[in-house]
Image (cartoon, helix red, strand yellow):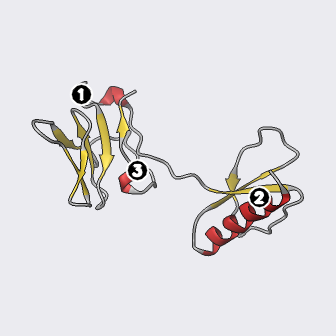
Amino acid sequence: MSKEQVTQHYISVMQAFIAGENIEVREKVVTNGRWAPAGAPAWNFGDREYRIKPKSKPTVDWSALHPSIQCIARDSNGNIFGYSSRPVIRDERVWAGLGGIECKRLDNVIASLTPGDCDWQDSLVARP
C-alpha cells in the first residue's frame, strides 16, 4: 500500500472507533500475530496494526439440525430461522421461504447457535 492508502486506512479505522465500532490490534513484529480487542487504542502506528473488527455471521453445529435444514438466517428483529432451501428477503425486514420452503425458528432451541453481529441482510448461511 502507498503511504496515502495506509493513512486513509488508519483514518477510516479511527473514524469507525469514534462511531462506536469495535477495533482490533496486533503487533507488527509478530508474524501471523492474533488480533485482539483494542479497547481504548493508544494509536501506536509504528509498532501496531489496527483494523475494524470483522462482522460475523450466525454459526451453528449443523449436525444438531435436521438434514432438511439447508440454510440459516437472522431477521431484522434478531430471530433466527432454519430453511429447507435458500430464502429471500421480504418486506425489507425478514427472510422468507417461497413456494413450499420449510421454515423453523431456531434461536432459544439450538444450544450451538450463535447469532453473529453482521447486518441481518448479510446473515444468510448455507449448510457446508
Q: Which residue type does callout 3 highlight?
A: Asp
Of the image marks 1 and 2, the number of the one nearer the N terminus: 2
What is the crowding at mark 3: few (fewer than 14 residues within 10 Å), some, or many (at least 20)?
some
The image quarter containing residue 29 is top right
For the C terminus, the quadrant is top left
Residue 11 position in % (x across, y down): 72, 68
Residue at image location 49% in from the left, 48% down from the top: 56
Contact (CB < 8 A) between labels 3 and 1? Answer: no
Real-space CA distance between mark 2 and mark 3, rounded to the nearest whole angstrom: 27 Å
Residue 65 position in % (x across, y down): 28, 30
User: What residue sits right under mark 3 in the picture?
Assistant: 122
Q: Secondary structure at mark 1?
A: loop
Specify the label residue 42 is tagged with. none
Q: Is residue 54 left or right of residue 101?
A: right
Q: Is residue 78 left or right of residue 52?
A: left
User: What residue sits right under mark 1 in the picture?
Assistant: 66
Residue 40 position in % (x across, y down): 71, 70
